[in-house]
Amino acid sequence: MKSQLTAHTPGLFRKKRCLIGVLCYLSVAFAPAKIKKENVVLKCSLATPVFCVFLFCLASAGVRVEARTHQSPAALHGQLSTRPVQTVEELCNVFLGIPYRADGVINDDGHYATFKSPDKPLPTPGLNCSGFVLVVSRLILNKSISLSQAVRDRENDSGPGSPFGHDWDFGFDLIMNCSDGARRTVLFPKGDTTPEKLTGFTAPAWDPHADSFATDFLPHVREGHVYLVSFSRHRTSAGLARSHYHVGLFLRAKERVWFYSTTHESGRVIRMDLASAAGLAQFRWSFRNTKNSFKRLTIVETQSVLP
C-alpha cells in the first residue's frame, strides 16, 4: 500500500481527478442546494470564478495528492476551502449531506450516475449506501475500484433467477470487493469460528443489539482504520434466509466512534456517534429487529492511507 493518494490509475484516478473528479464535482453539483447538516441549515453559494481558479491550481500542482496535504473543498455546502483534509473523519465529513438516491453512485469518470446506467451522468447529486461506501473506499484505500469490480458476484450465486434471491449478498460482495488487495481483517465475534470459505452465508454475524457489540467491538475500533460493514436481514419465518441489504462504515475519531451511511429514511449521508449512549440507541433503533426478521453485521477492518 502506498503512503500517498495519487491519480495515475484507470478511470477516475488515471485522469488525474482523484479529488477533482469526486469532491470538486460534488461541490459544483451542490451549489444551488440548501442542505441540512447536523441540525444546521447552510445556504450554498459557491462562486464559479473562485472554483475555476481552485481547479486550475490543483491541475498545475499535478494533482499529486499527499495523504496529509491534499487540498479539497472542506464542505460541499457552499464554502470552498483549501484547508488540508488530514484524517479519515475529515474526508468522510466532506460527503455529509449528499442527498440519498435509491440507485446512486459516482461512476468511473467522477460523475453522478446509477449502478444500472453508469454511462449516463446525472445533473444532480445523489448516493445510495453502496455508492457512498464505494467512493470513500476509493479514497481511503488509494485504490482505483471500478463499478464492475465493486459489484462483482464473488460466488456467482446471486444473479437473476438465483434461488436465494437476486443480489441477495450484494452488500457482502461490495465490502469484500472494495477491500480486495488491501490490508484487511474480517472480524468475528467471540465464540465464532473462521469458516473454510467466507461467503455471504458463512460471514460473521455480529448482533448490534447484543452487549458484546458494545463491549467487544466498539471499544476496539482504532484510529486510522476504517471498518466496512454489511447489514444482513435474517428471516424468522419462511422465505429468504438471509439478505445483505445495506452497507456503511465505522471509524474512530478520538473518543468518538462514528457510523456513516445513507438510507431512504435519513434522506442524505449522515453519521452518528456510537460511543454515546444516545447514538448507540439511535443506531440500534435504526436497525431494529422485527417480528419476522433480525439483523446481523459483517465487519471488515481496513487500514486507511489517512490517519
Image (cartoon, rainbow, N blue to C red):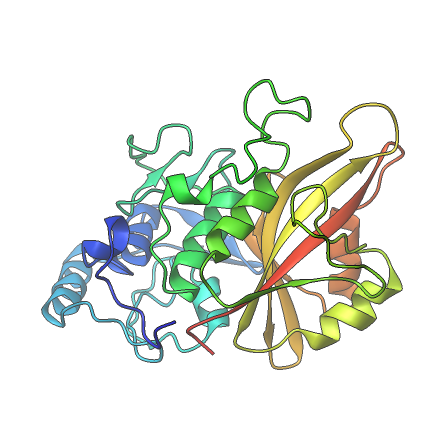
The front one of 268 and 113 is: 113
Task: Report the residue at 41% width, 44% height from top.
Answer: 149
The front one of 80 and 243 is: 243
Say whether residue 176 is left or right of residue 57. Answer: right
Q: Is residue 178 above or below residue 291?
A: below
Q: Is residue 83 above or below residue 10?
A: below
Q: Is residue 294 above or below residue 198?
A: above
Instruction: Residue 295: give x, y in percent of width and height.
Output: 78, 45
Task: Report the residue at 24% width, 57% height from top.
Answer: 9
Task: Report the residue at 79% width, 71% height from top.
Answer: 216
Is residue 275 in view?
Answer: no
Instruction: Residue 161: give x, y in percent of width and height.
Output: 59, 18
User: Which image quarter is the N terminus in?
Assistant: bottom left
Is residue 222 in view?
Answer: yes
Instruction: Residue 248: give x, y in percent of width and height.
Output: 59, 53
In this rendering, the count of numbered labels is 0
Say whether residue 145 is left or right of residue 40. Answer: left
Q: Quadrant of residue 137?
A: bottom left
Residue occupying the far top of the picture: 161
Say whether residue 52 is left or right of residue 196. Answer: left
The front one of 211 and 269 is: 211
Q: Quadrant of residue 167?
A: top right
Instruction: Residue 63: give x, y in percent of width and height.
Output: 19, 67
The front one of 56 and 245 is: 245
Say whether residue 266 is left or right of residue 268. Answer: right
